[in-house]
Amino acid sequence: MDRYFDGEENMKTPEKELDSKPLKAEELKKWYKEELERRDKEIEELKEKNTILMKASLNSSKKIADLTEKLEKAIKK
């Protein structure tokens, strides 16, 4: 839900949304806190996915190195 400041201590939603009333300071703080928590959760999920991908790529790299070494030994024989 996109929101914008109306120049005062209120925050409004775009006119296209049904909930277009301004937010009071307390509501704004609550909304901001929830938004930060949601973004922190997304960041943690992305970190976990990145860790999994890095481990998978490291394993693939090790396998390629092992196969290359075996191929070089086979060629020397």
Image (tube, grey):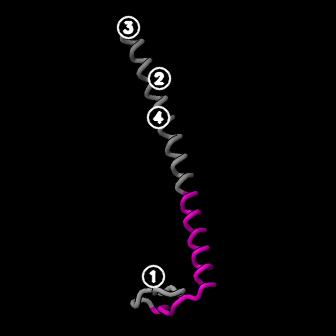
Placement of 24 over or under 33, stated as above or below: below
Tell me if label 2 and label 3 are in contact, CB under 8 Å.
Answer: no
Distance of label 2 from label 4 (alpha carbons): 10 Å
For the residue pair 45 and 10, the one nearer the viewer reads as 10
Placement of 31 over or under 18, stated as above or below: above
First reached walking from the N terminus: tag 1 or tag 3: 1
Placement of 17 over or under 76, stated as above or below: below
Q: Amino acid at mark 4?
A: Ser
Checking the image for residue 60, the label placed there is 4
Q: Badge 1 is on which residue?
A: 4
First reached walking from the N terminus: tag 1 or tag 2: 1
First reached walking from the N terminus: tag 2 or tag 4: 4
Q: Badge 3 is on which residue?
A: 76
Distance of label 1 from label 2 (alpha carbons): 56 Å
Checking the image for residue 66, the label placed there is 2
> Tag 4, which secondary structure?
helix
Q: Residues within 10 Å of mark 4 (few under 14, many from 20)?
A: few
Q: Which stretch did the figure color magenta?
A: 18-45
Distance of label 1 from label 3 (alpha carbons): 69 Å
**Mark closer to the observer (4, 1):** 1
Distance of label 2 from label 3 (alpha carbons): 16 Å
Quadrant in the picture for residue 70: top left
Q: Residues within 10 Å of mark 3 (few under 14, many from 20)?
A: few
**Mark closer to the observer (1, 3):** 1
Distance of label 4 from label 3 (alpha carbons): 24 Å
Secondary structure predominantly adopted by residues drawn in magenta? helix
Tell me if label 2 and label 4 are in contact, CB under 8 Å.
Answer: no
